[in-house]
Image (cartoon, rainbow, N blue to C red):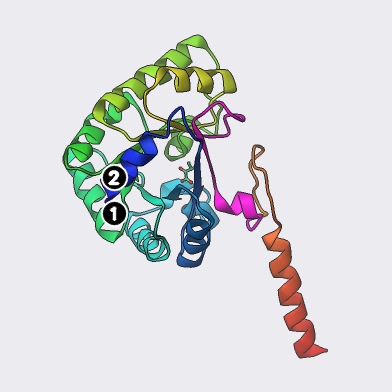
Amino acid sequence: MSPSEKALRLRARKGHAPISALTAYDYPTARLLDEAGVDLLLVGDSLGMVVLGFPDTTHVTLADMIHHTAAVARGSQNALIVGDLPIHTYPDPATALANARLLVKAGAHAVKLEGGLRQADKVAAITADGIPVVGHLGMLPQRVKVEGGYKKKGKTEQETQALLNGALALQQAGITALVLESVLPAAARYLTEHLEVPTIGIGCGRSNCDGEIAVITDVIGSYPWFVPPFANPRANVAGEITRAVQGYLDALTG
Ligand code: KIV
């Protein structure tokens, strides 16, 4: 199936079956998630924190994204692979398109970028080239320094309407799906109901979007130093690593 067909298949899921999405940054994780049947693998710029050890996503470069997207592509057969365009890589439509092409060359089927109205022309340039785009609204991690922290969105009617205007502009520009991050449940539900494209929520409460996305390290408990309040860990991989390494050390020294 071509990347465009995969994207269309995902878009057609709205109103039918919930979309499952997880981040992946490397070959083994991508392979395990793909074989488990996850619909969408996001090579998120969250890798800046959970893989590269930076305080936020603003340190991630296009070279980082290309490197990790290629690894994920080697591990995945079925999922739609979405690569994040990192901060400062989509300042204008021509640059956005050139950089989106580089992620596609590395193995991404689609790219994701953050923002609404101000990004519509970049989204239009990329989709016109046949590259599917996933939008991202609500709390925008690439703006964490500008906004002075991670804040919930959709707190007022005015804010929710602004989100909808941005989402409609992105939809008009041809996005395949829209990630909503840390949008209050009622606002997320309102956006979901007023859009033709599927919404994929993180930190928006349960069942307010057409699908859910989670950072894989939050799901498997492999990054214990920061766990967002909305995370729902289903394993304690960090504990298992410590236990296994302790056994290794004990066997050597004991
Ligand atoms: O980079 C990322 O992991 C993301 C998700 C939080 C949606 O953008």
Instruction: Please state if 237 lies on the left or on the right of 181 as rendered.
Output: right
* Image quadrant in which you'd find residue 91: top left
Does residue 52 appear anywhere in the picture?
no
Location of residue 168 in the rendering, given as x and y in whole percent from the top left corner? 33, 21
Can residue 250 be found in the magenta stretch? no
Q: In x, y percent, where is residue 5?
A: 29, 45
Say which quadrant the C terminus sits in. bottom right
Query: Sequence-wise, which precedes: disc 2 or disc 1?
Result: 2
Q: Give the number of the disc on residue 5.
A: 2
Q: CA distance from mark 2 to mark 1?
A: 18 Å
Viewer-proximal residue, 2 or 29?
Answer: 2
Q: Name the image quarter holding residue 92.
A: top left
Residue most extreme to the right: 254
Q: Which residue does the image show at 21% across and 33% down from the upper left?
A: 124
Give the residue type that dot 2 points to: Glu
Residue 220 magenta-drawn? yes
With respect to residue 106, does 200 lie above or below? above
32 left or right of 84? Answer: right
Residue 160, image x, y percentages: 47, 16
Foreground disc of the pair 2, 1: 2
Q: What numbered label is drawn on residue 152?
A: none
Q: Which residue is mark 1?
A: 103
Q: Amino acid at mark 1?
A: Leu
- Can residue 80 be seen from the camera position used here? yes
* Region rendered in magenta: 201-223
Q: Position of residue 153 (x, y in %)?
A: 52, 24
Question: 252 or 128: which is nearer to us?
Answer: 128
Disc 2 within 8 angstroms of ligand 1 (CB): no
Asked which secondary structure carries label 1, the reply is helix
Which SS class for mark 2? helix
Q: How many marks?
A: 2
